[in-house]
Amino acid sequence: MTDWTTADIPSLSGKTVVVTGATGGLGYETALALAGAGAIVILTGRNDAKGLRAIEGICAQFPNALIAYEHLDLANLSSVADFARRFAASNDQLDLLVNNAGVMALPNRQQTEDGFEMQLGTNYLGHYALTARLLPQLRRAKAARVVNLSSLAHRSGAINFDDLQSQRSYRPWRAYCQSKLAMLMFSLELQRRSDAAGWGLRSVAAHPGYARTDLIPNGPGADTLQWRVSRLLQPLISQSAAEGALPTLFAATSPTAEPGGYYGPNWFYELKGPPVAARIMPHAKDFASSATLWDVSATLTGVSFDEIAAAA
C-alpha cells in the first residue's frame, strides 16, 4: 500500500459518484481521478462558475468523462435537501459519496444560513445531513462507500457540547479542530450504525496531510504568522493537491480499505506521501461521545438516519 497511486484505482465504469467541494483543490483532484477511472461523477460546489470551469478542466484531460456539476451549499440545509431531491429524481442508487468540502480557521466567527458556526456547519453538519438524505440511494448500491474528510487537526480537537456553536468563545483553530474531529467520529459511528442496522455501507475516513490548496489562504489568510512560516517550510513538508487526494482515493476505491478505517500520508507526522493507515486519537473512538454527537446532529439538522431508512 505504501506505493499506491491513481494507477491502482480499479475500473469504476457504471459507478455513480458524488464529490462535495469539487470545484478546486482536493475535491477537484478526487473528481478528476474518479472520472478518469470511468465513474459517473457529479461534482458539487457553491460557485457555479468554478463548477463549470472544473468540468472543462476534467474534460480537457478525459474527453469522454461522464461528469456533471450540481449546486450544493453545505452551509445551507435547504440547499442540501434540494440537492438530495434532485439527485433522487434522476438516480436510483449512489455507489460512492465523498464528503470533502470544507472551510478552515475563519478569523472571525461566521454563521451558516441555519445559525450554525460556519466551520461546524459546513465541514460536519452539512455532510451529516447530506449523507442521511442520500441513504436510500446508498443502500440500493451493491457495495456503497462513504468517504469522510478529516484532518491531522482532529488530534487537537475536542467536542464542546456545552458550547458546540462557539457562541460564548470563538477561536478559529479550535473550531476547525472540533469540526474535523466531528467528521472522523461521524465516519466511525456511521460504520457502527450501518453494521447494526444492516445498511450495507462501508464508511471510511481520510486526511490529506499537508496539501497545497486554497484552504489556508481562504481561511486564516496569508497575513498570519502561521501561514507565513508554513509557506517557508512548504517545499519540505507539503505535497500537491493531487498527492493530497491519494488517501481519499484509496479510501474510496481500494478493495483493501477497511470499513471504519482511516487513511493518510505515510511520511513524518503523516504530512505527505502515499496513503497508509492513519493514527486515530483515542478521543475520536469514544463510543459515548460519538453517540451523543450523532443524536445532537439529528436534532440540530432535523434529519434522522433511522427515520429515512425506515421510510425508504
Image: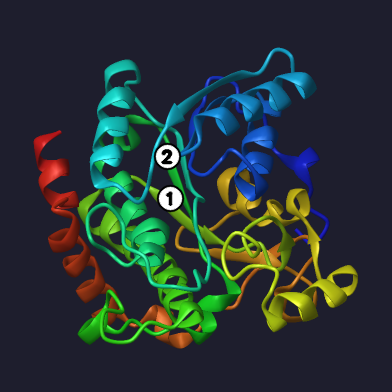
In front of the other: 113 or 196: 113
In front of the other: 27 or 147: 27
Q: Quadrant of the C terminus?
A: top left
Residue at (60% x, 59% y) in the render: 218
Residue 97 x %, y %: 45, 41
Q: Which of the 4 image quadrants contains residue 183?
A: bottom left
The residue that label 2 is drawn on is: 144
Residue 73 x %, y %: 38, 43
On the picture, is 279 further left or further right than 121?
right
Three-letter amino acid code at the position of disc 1: Arg
The residue that label 1 is drawn on is: 202
Q: Quadrant of the N terminus?
A: bottom right
Look at the picture and state if 95 lies above or below 281.
above
Mark closer to the chain start, 1 or 2: 2
Three-letter amino acid code at the position of disc 2: Ala
Label 2 element class: loop
What whole-number distance in Å separates the C-alpha atoms at marks 1 and 2? 6 Å
> Mark 2: few, some, or many residues within 10 Å (few <14, many ≥20)?
many
Residue at (33% x, 60% y) in the render: 121
Look at the picture and state if 121 lies above or below 138.
below
Instruction: Looking at this view, name the residue that lies furthest to the right.
Output: 235
Evaluate whether residue 259 shows in this view: yes
Instruction: Looking at this view, name the residue that lies furthest to the top.
Output: 64
Marks 1/2 in contact by CB < 8 Å: the verdict is yes
Look at the picture and state if 2 lies above or below 6.
below
